[in-house]
């Protein structure tokens, strides 16, 4: 579980989902709200701004940026790249069930 110790960021969506399922990372309520929205609609992270995502989730833009750090990323752009890579892969190979 994440308890202030630095974690290694996930390298793909499957690893991110495994981290969550195995409770290697636990989310405070506002971060959880953003994470749930991101998993339901990866496009909002891949193509949104911290402001647009925050507006959709009812949180502040800084909460969206904090999610990136909470997952071990150095910044929001790095988190967005993970989601863009996932969408590019699913579009090239068809929808996934993971």
Image (spheres, grey):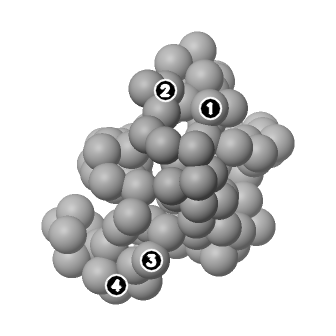
Residue 48, percent across and down?
40, 79
Task: Identify the residue at image location x=30%, y=45%.
Answer: 40
Measure the C-alpha gap from mark 3 to mark 1.
19 Å
Element under disc 2: loop
Q: Earlier in the sequence, mark 3 or mark 2?
A: 3
Q: Residues within 10 Å of mark 4 (few under 14, many from 20)?
A: some
Element under disc 4: helix
Circle 2 residue: 98
Residue 29, percent across and down?
30, 43
Q: For the view shown, which residue lies furthest in the front direction?
A: 93
Circle 1 residue: 14
Circle 4 residue: 51
Would you say the residues marked 1 and 2 are in contact, meaning their CB atoms lie under 8 Å apart? yes
Q: As rendered, which of 28 and 23 lies closer to the eye? A: 23
Task: Identify the residue at image location x=51%, y=18%.
Answer: 21
Q: As rendered, which of 97 and 57 lies closer to the eye? A: 97
Circle 3 residue: 47
Q: Is residue 79 visible?
A: no
Would you say the residues marked 3 and 2 are in contact, meaning their CB atoms lie under 8 Å apart? no
Q: Earlier in the sequence, mark 1 or mark 2?
A: 1
From this view, report whether residue 74 is shown above or below residue 93.
below
From this view, report whether residue 68 is shown above or below residue 47.
above
Residue 14 position by quadrant: top right
Q: Earlier in the sequence, mark 2 or mark 4?
A: 4
Would you say the residues marked 4 and 3 are in contact, meaning their CB atoms lie under 8 Å apart? no
Q: Earlier in the sequence, mark 3 or mark 1?
A: 1
How many labels, in total? 4
């Amino acid at each position: 579980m994440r308890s202030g110790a630095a974690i290694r960021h996930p390298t793909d969506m499957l690893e991110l989902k495994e981290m969550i399922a195995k409770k290697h990372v636990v989310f405070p309520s506002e971060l959880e709200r953003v994470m749930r929205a991101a998993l339901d609609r990866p496009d909002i992270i891949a193509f949104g701004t911290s402001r647009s995502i925050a507006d959709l989730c009812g949180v502040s833009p800084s909460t969206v940026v904090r999610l990136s750090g909470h997952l071990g990323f150095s910044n929001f752009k790095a988190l967005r790249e993970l989601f863009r890579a996932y969408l590019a892969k699913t579009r090239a190979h068809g929808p996934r069930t993971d």
